[in-house]
Amino acid sequence: MVDPNQITTQTVMGVGLRHPHYREIASAAPRKDISWLEVHPENYFGGGINFKFLEEIRKNYPISFHGVGLSLGAAQPPDEHHLAQLKELITRIEPFQFSDHASWSASGNAHLNDLLPLAYNAENLDNLCRNIDVAQNYLGQEILIENPSTYMRFHDDEMPEWAFLNKAVSRTGCHLLLDINNVQVQANNHGFSAAAYFEHINFGAVREIHLAGYAEKIIEGQSVYIDTHGQAVHDDVWGLFDNVMARHAPVRTLIEWDNDIPPLNTLLDEAAKAQRIIDAHHHAELRHVTV
């Protein structure tokens, strides 16, 4: 099995493990073109057949948890029952890292299916940092937080997103999951420079990159990018990834495809494309990371 504590340019690429590919991956011998897999842990709470597949697949591949349910940006702390289920699953599967989102999805007893955006101000930064601290203390490990995709901005924003995330990293000791597709979606929707975003984000805190597809729609005569995770990575996102890899050492990179899921080989073709970009800039480079 790949050692998740060591990254080389040959072990950096991963793909999301989704239900249509469970049997294909679980029943085959370990594949050299899959270095690691990422799952949404909430899909495995309570055991069942999904957990059995994950348990079997874990024997051959390192697993990363990418949470969608902690609501780290909410005004209230993370739900303790959710944290308890998450910690139990971490104990059983032993993922090499855990990530969630800089967004919110819970208010009082209401739990929403969407990852909702935050106004980037001091009050929400305090809430996010408090909740990251709660999660890290409960789980006993540092976590990663992901930059969101958004379709509106707030009048009471006090700082750009990159500054908001950098402050959260500085205050909590967490790390970043940098979703390059999300940056491109926001740059188009809100009219800022994606290149400038990458100039300012604290890349030293980035432990993972996501690459995914978006959809472009015309709404009231304006182009809007929608973060669908339902198609191949677009050329502009590939271009941003190439620029990032030209400037920074490689980190774990995931092809994320959650809707209209294609055959596994299509995901692996996308991963191979990302691998070629990494190799073009970092051939045979070795990097050790702490997880």
Image (cartoon, rainbow, N blue to C red):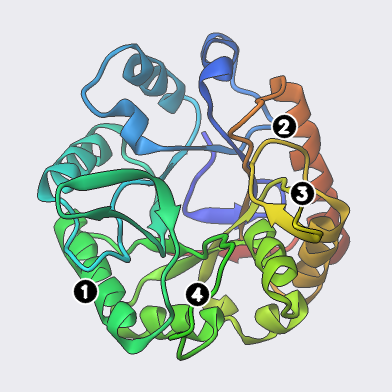
| Place of residue 259 in the rendered image (x, y in percent of width and height, measured from the top left) | 61, 31
- Looking at the image, tell me whether mark 2 or mark 4 is earlier in sequence order: 4
The residue pinned by badge 3 equals 217
- The kind of residue tagged 4 is Ala
- Looking at the image, tell me whether mark 3 or mark 2 is earlier in sequence order: 3
The residue pinned by badge 2 equals 267
Front-most of 256 and 74?
A: 74
The residue pinned by badge 1 equals 130
Name the front one of labels 1 and 2. Answer: 1
Residue at 48% over, 48% down: 4
Q: CA distance from mark 3 to mark 2?
A: 24 Å
Is 8 left, or right, of 140 in this rendering? right
Q: Check the image and report above or below for 104 versus 83.
A: below
Q: Check the image and report above or below for 152 versus 87.
A: below
Q: CA distance from mark 2 to mark 4?
A: 27 Å
Residue at 69% over, 67% down: 189
- Looking at the image, tell me whether mark 3 or mark 4 is earlier in sequence order: 4
Q: CA distance from mark 4 to mark 1?
A: 19 Å
